[in-house]
Image: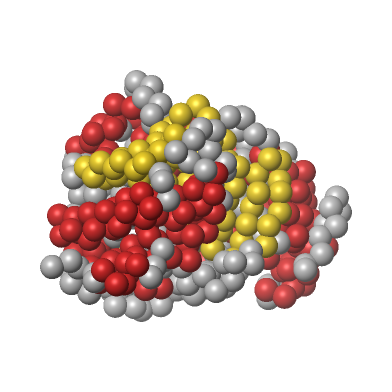
């Protein structure tokens, strides 16, 4: 018996039918199964949007690749758009590794074939059950330009370092990679010279050290034409309860210096997105190794980006560096203490993420499994820091936090010990040769906590992580201005967010007028 009755097929478009199959499949498997497969089925509103942004084909006979097809809803939506251009034939190659899904995929593709046959279009498809990355990784080394269109909602999950796919693509790997970036990378050389690539993926690849090699490879071969950003984390794949900032991108190999950035909150306003055209150089510095992708969504964000471009220094130019806290709690359990020991054990404060709020460090704050002391021994000295002036910056923010950047100055007179502990979920900023002056520590903290810096950070960072690498790459105003800002806040003894925003704006808006829209 067919999974879906024939009378339903006759009253729906192929993409509607594929969507219905996806819903029926989801009802038959557990959430754990879908999570293990990295499955987040594309809602039809999104598949239609992705199909509609496809450009006119260069030929009446086209080839399509869907490397993680599910029930083939993206292929269906793309073809529903492309048949407007009087196609003669379509050849599809699709990959799906979930054996539980095969019957649904097969029925969807058979339905699509019947629908196209009725329209006089020859349709051939190949459904492949093997792993797309393992099959096609060779395309990175050998040009294999085969497809006019590659469209995909790839799986999202992290890969272990010993995974076979990681070894195949080791040149693109740093840290723990996410499989979706491998789908994008492998697709690059499978695309014809005049072909088009359309993906929906998490925004996380746009910045961060782990994706540096991927971005360098991808943006060296693909020119972006279009990016749609969903500003809400929860309104894109809400059927699967996914909290992920996602985007749709369209690119090609042919050079183009114009990019359209489109935005919507979620699905309800997807048919009326806000669009603006940019020069490619405004959102990606292709001459840089990092190739960070900036996605401004408001006029205020555009002006903030202009302001940052007017600054010519990074922190390292001032002999100031940022690093990640060296104390990894689970590796140092025997060194951690919940209470002070007035014995031969020599303890020093250990600072965690929860000890740091904007412009303020609160210690001790006793939280379960967050010991506030660390033992100073000969072996532990290598993971402790000299007690001197720093800026502590949280490495993670809450999904509901209003600010991504949360920083506070730390002063050495806070403690009388020679060494202190900084846990791994904090970044710390310090002077390489000597010590941060108080006005520098306060000025840098205030800048990071300001609305302007937080706004800029959000134009390229779509997750809750704040990496030391991203801060190293950020532009800063001249050190004299930073000191002056810090001195101003210290003399007034007012570190409120309102005062910081007002003062930072006063000092920093000299070159470019910024008006919050």
Q: Can residue 33 be seen?
A: yes
Which image quarter is the N terminus in? bottom left
343 on left or right of 266: left
Which image quarter is the C terminus in? bottom right
Seen in the picture, residue 320 relative to 217 is either above or below; the reply is below
Q: Can residue 469 be seen?
A: no
Residue 319 place in picture, x, y as percent: 61, 39
Residue 297 place in picture, x, y as percent: 66, 59
Residue 335 place in picture, x, y as percent: 24, 60
- Viewer-nearest residue: 295 or 101: 101
Residue at coordinates 17% horizontally, 66% vertically from top-left? 2
Residue 420 place in picture, x, y as percent: 41, 58
Residue at coordinates 26% horizontally, 68% vertically from top-left? 6
Seen in the picture, residue 87 relative to 374 is either above or below; the reply is above
- Viewer-nearest residue: 146 or 420: 146
All told, the count of numbered labels is 0
Quarter location, residue 409: bottom right
- Viewer-nearest residue: 178 or 415: 178
235 on left or right of 98: right
Residue at coordinates 76% horizontally, 48% vertically from top-left? 306
């Amino acid at each position: 018996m067919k999974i879906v009755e024939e009378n339903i097929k006759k009253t729906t478009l192929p993409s509607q039918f594929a969507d219905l199959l996806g819903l029926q499949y989801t009802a038959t498997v557990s959430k754990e199964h879908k999570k293990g497969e990295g499955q987040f089925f594309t809602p039809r509103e999104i598949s239609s949007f992705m199909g509609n942004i496809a450009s006119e084909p260069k030929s009446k006979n086209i080839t399509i690749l869907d490397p993680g097809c599910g029930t083939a809803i993206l292929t269906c939506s793309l073809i529903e758009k492309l048949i407007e251009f009087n196609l003669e034939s379509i050849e599809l190659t699709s990959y799906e590794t979930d054996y539980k899904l095969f019957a649904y995929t097969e029925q969807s593709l058979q339905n699509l074939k019947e629908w196209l046959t009725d329209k006089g279009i020859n349709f051939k498809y190949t459904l492949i059950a093997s792993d797309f990355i393992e099959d096609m990784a060779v395309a990175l080394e050998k040009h294999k330009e085969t497809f006019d269109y590659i469209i995909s909602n790839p799986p999202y999950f992290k890969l272990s370092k010993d995974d076979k796919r990681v070894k195949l693509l080791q040149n693109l790997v740093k840290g723990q990679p996410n499989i979706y970036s491998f789908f994008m990378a492998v697709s690059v050389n499978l695309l014809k010279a005049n072909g088009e690539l359309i993906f929906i993926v998490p925004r996380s690849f746009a910045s961060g050290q782990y994706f540096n090699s991927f971005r360098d490879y991808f943006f060296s071969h693909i020119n972006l034409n279009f990016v749609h950003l969903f500003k809400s984390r929860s309104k894109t794949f809400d059927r699967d309860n996914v909290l992920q900032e996602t985007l749709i991108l369209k690119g090609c190999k042919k050079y183009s210096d114009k990019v359209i950035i489109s935005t919507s909150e979620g699905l309800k306003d997807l048919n009326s997105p806000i669009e603006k055209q940019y020069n490619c150089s405004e959102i990606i510095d292709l001459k840089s190794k990092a190739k960070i992708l900036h996605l401004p969504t408001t006029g205020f964000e555009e002006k903030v980006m202009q302001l940052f471009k007017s600054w010519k220094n990074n922190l390292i130019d001032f002999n100031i560096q940022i690093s990640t806290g060296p104390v990894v709690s689970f590796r140092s359990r025997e060194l951690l203490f919940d209470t002070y020991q007035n014995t031969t054990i020599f303890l020093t404060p250990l600072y965690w993420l929860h000890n740091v709020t904007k412009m303020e460090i609160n210690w001790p704050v006793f939280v379960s499994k967050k010991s506030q002391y660390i033992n100073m021994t000969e072996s532990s000295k290598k993971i402790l820091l000299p007690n001197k002036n720093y800026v502590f910056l949280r490495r993670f923010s809450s999904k509901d936090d209003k600010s991504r950047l949360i920083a506070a100055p730390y002063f050495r007179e806070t403690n009388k010990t020679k060494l202190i502990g900084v846990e791994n979920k904090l970044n710390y900023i310090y002077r390489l040769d000597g010590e941060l002056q108080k006005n520098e520590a306060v000025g840098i903290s205030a800048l990071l906590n300001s609305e302007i810096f937080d706004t800029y950070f959000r134009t390229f960072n779509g997750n809750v992580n704040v990496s030391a690498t991203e801060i190293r790459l950020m532009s800063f105003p001249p050190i004299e201005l930073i000191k002056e800002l810090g001195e101003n806040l210290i003399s007034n003894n007012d570190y409120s967010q309102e005062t910081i925003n007002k003062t930072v704006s006063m000092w920093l808006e000299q070159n470019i007028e910024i008006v919050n829209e």
